[in-house]
Image (spheres, grey):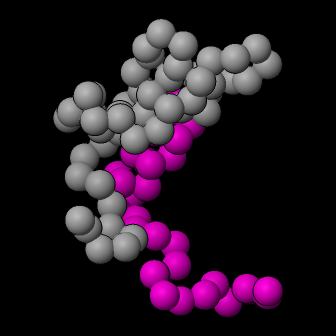
Amino acid sequence: MKEPGAQLDGRLAVAEVAGAYLVVREADPADWLVRFEKSPGFPAREWAENMASIYNRRLELGGGPPTPPGTRPPGYHP
C-alpha cells in the first residue's frame, strides 16, 4: 500500500461498460478506480472524463496534492 497522498502510477482513462462509465488506469484498464452509473439526468460520462482529465493534467504539471498530508490550508476554518 502506498503512503497517504501518493499518486497512482501513470495516466487515467475512461472506459464504458454496460450501465456505467469507469475511470481506469490507462496501463491496466481492468483496474478501475471509480464507477459512475448511467442514469437519467446524471452526466456520468462527463463526470468520468472530467476526473480523468483533471488528474492527467496535474500529473503532466508535476503537481502533488495542493496541501501536503497532515497540514491544513492557511484559510482553513472549522
The residue positioned 61% from the left and 33% from the top of the image is 47
For residue 30, above or below residue 68: above
The image shows a total of numbered marks equal to: 0
How far from the left and from the top, in percent, is residue 56?
40, 45
Quadrant where the C terminus is found in the figure: bottom right
Q: Is 55 one of the magenta-colored residues?
A: yes
- Of residue 4 and residue 76, the one placed in the foreground of this image is 4
The residue positioned 79% from the left and 87% from the top of the image is 77
Boundaries of the magenta span: 49-78
For residue 24, above or below residue 44: below
Most distant residue in the left direction: 27
Left-right relation of 46 to 4: right
Q: Is 28 one of the magenta-colored residues?
A: no
Left-right relation of 11 to 69: left
- Of residue 74 and residue 30, the one placed in the foreground of this image is 30
The residue positioned 70% from the left and 17% from the top of the image is 39
Left-right relation of 66 to 58: right
How far from the left and from the top, in percent, is residue 49?
52, 30
Left-right relation of 25 to 52: left
The residue positioned 28% from the left and 35% from the top of the image is 31
